[in-house]
Amino acid sequence: MKARQSSKTYSCLKEMIFNGTIPMGTRLREVHLAQQLRVSRTPIREALQQLLAEGLIEADGQGFRATVYSPARVAEIYGCRALLESESARLVARHGLTAESRQRMENAVAACDALLAGAQATGRLSDVDVRRAFLDQNNIFHSALHESCPNRLLRELIAQVSDIPASIRNYFRFSDGQLLESHNVHKQILRAIVAQDGERAAAQMREHIWSARDRMDPDAFATINRGDIAAPDAPAAEDRITVNVSP
């Protein structure tokens, strides 16, 4: 029971960091988290140590804070992604997609075709809901591809380097044209993989991720490098944590 509660507490806190419930830079207090999650301080303490080991939180001499990702660190992450995901695309092209992964990728492409065509027709390509829907399908496309990768360690490394808070993506700037181009590259990657052209698939994936990295806006990061609350105008974490992980 104790191990299960510790695992649930860790998973809960990790998800809260990823989905922005705990913004970057937010101070994490054991007592408060234990009260909000309705657990004792022991599983909180164990979860914080695990998150610290994974780099998702930082020790600052006064306790822990959710890690603040600098532009340099995010650029490093995307550089690693370009290397890892391009090799994954090459291997998948060589060995072939599973039927399920191919279907998921094709469905993601088709969903974005419809989404972007409708948004273009109504002048809504820049709308937040359109961008979020596109990002959801983007994540499906990439995850489906890597699930077919025959190299287990490579899959694990991709998952590890991709584990960053979703709010990081708010600090990238894509014009409407760049959004459409990103979608077209997905189509090209899928065609290359289906054609078993590994080198082309790898090159396209590498350039796809480098292009995303180059659209990072360093100035946007200045708004999160402040005090106890990482995101500008975000409610305090203590006002937003309402999850109960007790049995």
Image (tube, grey):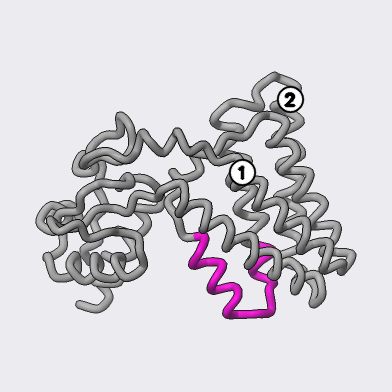
Q: Which residue is mark 2?
A: 120
* Residue under the point 75% across and 74% down: 91
52 relative position to 150: left or right = left
Secondary element at image label 2: helix
- Residue closest to the eye, 63 or 16: 63
User: How many labels were placed on the picture?
Assistant: 2
For badge 2, the amino acid type reads: Gln
Q: Is residue 87 above or below residue 150?
A: above
* Disc ID at residue 66: none
* Residue 145 among magenta residues: yes
Percent across and percent down for residue 224 are 34, 38
For badge 1, the amino acid type reads: Asp
Neighbour tally class for label 1: few under 14, some 14-19, many 20 plus, Cα within 10 Å:
few
Image quadrant of residue 62? Answer: bottom left
Percent across and percent down for residue 1 are 22, 78
Neighbour tally class for label 2: few under 14, some 14-19, many 20 plus, Cα within 10 Å:
some
Q: Is residue 20 above or below residue 60?
A: above
Secondary element at image label 1: helix
Q: Nearer the viewer, mark 1 or mark 2?
A: 1
Where does the magenta region start and end? Answer: 144-162
- The Cα–Cα distance between marks 1 and 2, rounded to whole angstroms, is 24 Å
76 relative position to 7: left or right = right
Image quadrant of residue 57? Answer: bottom left
Q: Which residue is mark 1?
A: 214
* Residue under the point 52% across and 60% down: 162
* Residue under the point 68% across and 36% down: 179
User: Residue reaching furthest front?
Assistant: 72
Image quadrant of residue 235? Answer: top left
- Looking at the image, tell me whether mark 1 or mark 2 is earlier in sequence order: 2
Percent across and percent down for residue 56 are 35, 60
User: Residue reaching furthest top?
Assistant: 123
Percent across and percent down for residue 150 are 69, 79
